[in-house]
Image (tube, coloured by chain):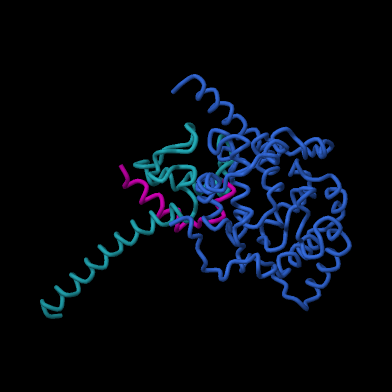
Amino acid sequence: MSKIRRLAVVMSAVAALMTGATAAAADGAALFKAKTCWSCHGKDAKTPLMPFYPSLAGQNAEYMFNQMKDIKSGARSNGNTAAMKGVMGLVNEEEMRVIADWLATLQ
Amino acid sequence: MSLKSMVTGLTAAVAISLSFGVNAADTSSWSKDTVSGETDQAMHLEPDLENGRDIFEVCSACHMPEGWGMTDGTFPQLAGQHRPVLIKQLADIRALNRDNPTMYPFALPESIGDEQALADVTAYIEKLPMNPENGKGEWAEGTPEFEQGKKLYADNCVRCHGDHGEGNKEKFYPRIEGQHYAYMLRQFEWIRDGKRRNANPDMVDQIKNFTDKDMKMVINYVSRVLVDKKDLAPSANWTNPDFD
């Protein structure tokens, strides 16, 4: 493979990654609204409807992903989970991952 | 945080946790609840549509700006529902007479306001045009399941919910035509099994022998009843101009 062609391949791979990252951020924000997460957690993800609902902006992604998964499956059913379980039918694990990753990037 | 808001918060937290566990059927006081103070008061207030629109913004985060809910049934369509039905359900949810942990905090006076707010927002919702493409069950007209559902409807439901699911405004019977299949199925099951505590005891009794298949067939039929065009939005792409 010529150097130029190799460079082109690398460049387009980088471009694809960058587009991918931007798309994920846009998807995260869009999903946060479309799946109605923001109704309770606040449009900025840190102004929750009730004082005892968690602020999510900047929270650990893995932690949030696990909570979403466990609330959906019923593995976690204490506290305020009853308020959230009913809407979790709207969200699959792939979407949970995108939402969690995006929320973790917020300040 | 003030002591008052802490107390409110704690009470709500307890209510949200408790409301999940309560499932005892207690429908003995249907008529008393139907005319509960707040429902009755809100019914007799002059609604302010402008304020109703502003309050509806809170509701629209889940029920959508068009009031159509979601066709998968996660949230019901509210558009076009009878005002007394909307008032009663809101009053029941915030009085913890209908368990709805997701909606409960939104229904609190701190979130949407007093009886006047109930009067206002329900007047706004009632006038919204309905989704012309509601979520439907799997059996098209002509299938045996559709026909059986139609028969079950005629034998069990028509007396209160009407020929085409129009309900009865004066009696707090909901309009069920045009509602999403999965939402109705869930409510029907909860009513049959005693989980929906504010259900009409006559209905609980009427449907107590329905099998799961009966339930699916009758709700499939209702989800496929054609709603009068004058009550529908021109297309499923319609967006509510009151919200940008």
Q: Residue at horizontal 71%, vertical 38%?
A: B39
Task: Give the quarter of the image for residue B147.
Answer: bottom right
Name, please, the residue furthest toward the top: B3
Tell which of B87 and A88 is nearer to you.
B87
**Chain B hue?**
blue
Tell which of B47 and B110 is nearer to you.
B47
Q: Residue at horizontal 84%, vertical 57%?
A: B210
- The image position of residue B209, as x and y in percent, is 87, 54
Q: Residue at horizontal 65%, vertical 57%?
A: B80
- The image position of residue B137, as x and y in percent, is 69, 67
**In-image side of B231 versus A35 (left or right):** right
- The image position of residue B168, as x and y in percent, is 78, 54
Does B121 sit above or below residue B158? above
Asked if residue B71 lies in the magenta stretch, the reply is no
Asked if residue A101 lies in the magenta stretch, the reply is yes
Does B200 sit above or below residue B161? above
- Magenta-tinted stretch: A85-107
Quarter holding the N terminus of chain B is top left
| Magenta stretch: dominant secondary structure | helix
Chain identifier matching the cyan colour in the rendered picture = A
Name, please, the residue furthest toward the bottom: A1
- The image position of residue B85, as x and y in percent, is 71, 48
**In-image side of A83 versus A4 (left or right):** right
Quarter holding the C terminus of chain B is bottom left
**In-image side of B205 versus A40 (left or right):** right
Count of numbered marks = 0
Does B141 sit above or below residue A30? below
Name, please, the residue furthest toward the left: A3
Task: Give the quarter of the image for residue B229.
Answer: bottom right
